[in-house]
Amino acid sequence: YEIADQFNFYNNLAKCDSIFAHNDFDTKFYKGLFPNKEINVIPSLLIEDQLKDITPAPEEKVIIGGNFARWYGGFQSYLVADELGVEKWTQESHAKRENEDQIPDLNHLPRLEWLKWMESLSRFKFAVHLMPTIAAGTFSLNCAYFGIPCIGNAKVDTQRLCHPLLSVDVEDVESARKLAIALKDPSFYKECSEMAKRNYRKFYDIEQWNTKINSKL
């Protein structure tokens, strides 16, 4: 970003009474910028109303949460996903790299509106999302809703809370590979799948969201 943009970003936030961030880890950043300002987390939210008719039918394939740009860490996710020995897929996005289509064993979903995306996601058995950018975490949250075990970034709240046994330092590709191998064990897979669905309800159900937000207002 240009220097002027960086200072404008800071100055605009400085005018706020309080700041809501995506993740608990993000609060450390904003508290460092504004030590005397109130900083809170606004959890990611999944509106389930249109998903009731989707019945998950997992197939022997893995979805990678992003393209081969640094923002998404797709290359690392691809290497880890390869350990599962199943079809590898990702979704096209604005960050899709030139020649990414030439990777012979990587399939691409087209860009989809959200409901079609969720229908497609429900047919995957595994997920890997070693995205270094600490953002809203909707990919990990969507996977948890369907009980899809997702290996991903431990600094992202939806990943850490919903998939605790599969959360790693995003640069710890070694541990991520070991977890992918472990997921081929049906008992460990079942444990992670059931835990994801249970923790989704525990931490991200709409009632939980309302309680958390109302307590901060």
Image (cartoon, rainbow, N blue to C red):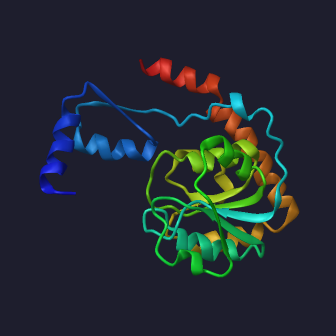
User: Count of labels shown?
Assistant: 0
Q: Nearer the viewer, residue 45 or 52?
A: 52
Is residue 145 visible in this depiction of the protein? Answer: yes
Image coordinates for residue 148, horizontal then vertical, percent: 74, 52
Q: Residue furthest left?
A: 4
Q: Is residue 47 above or below residue 67?
A: above
42 relative to 6 in the view: left or right = right
Is residue 175 visible in this depiction of the protein? Answer: no
Image coordinates for residue 197, horizontal then vertical, percent: 75, 42
Q: Nearer the viewer, residue 25 or 144?
A: 144
Q: Residue at x 14, y 47 (%)?
A: 7
The answer to which image quadrant residue 158 occupies is top right
Image coordinates for residue 122, horizontal then vertical, percent: 76, 49
Task: State which quarter of the image contains the N terminus.
Answer: bottom left
30 relative to 210 in the view: left or right = left
Image coordinates for residue 68, horizontal then vertical, percent: 50, 71
The answer to which image quadrant residue 105 occupies is bottom right
Q: Residue at x 70, y 70 (%)?
A: 88
Q: Nearer the viewer, residue 72 or 83?
A: 72
Q: Residue at x 62, y 44 (%)?
A: 141
Q: Is residue 22 above or below residue 175?
A: above
Task: State which quarter of the image contains the C terminus.
Answer: top left
Q: Residue at x 39, y 45 (%)?
A: 26
Q: Is residue 198 above or below residue 1?
A: above
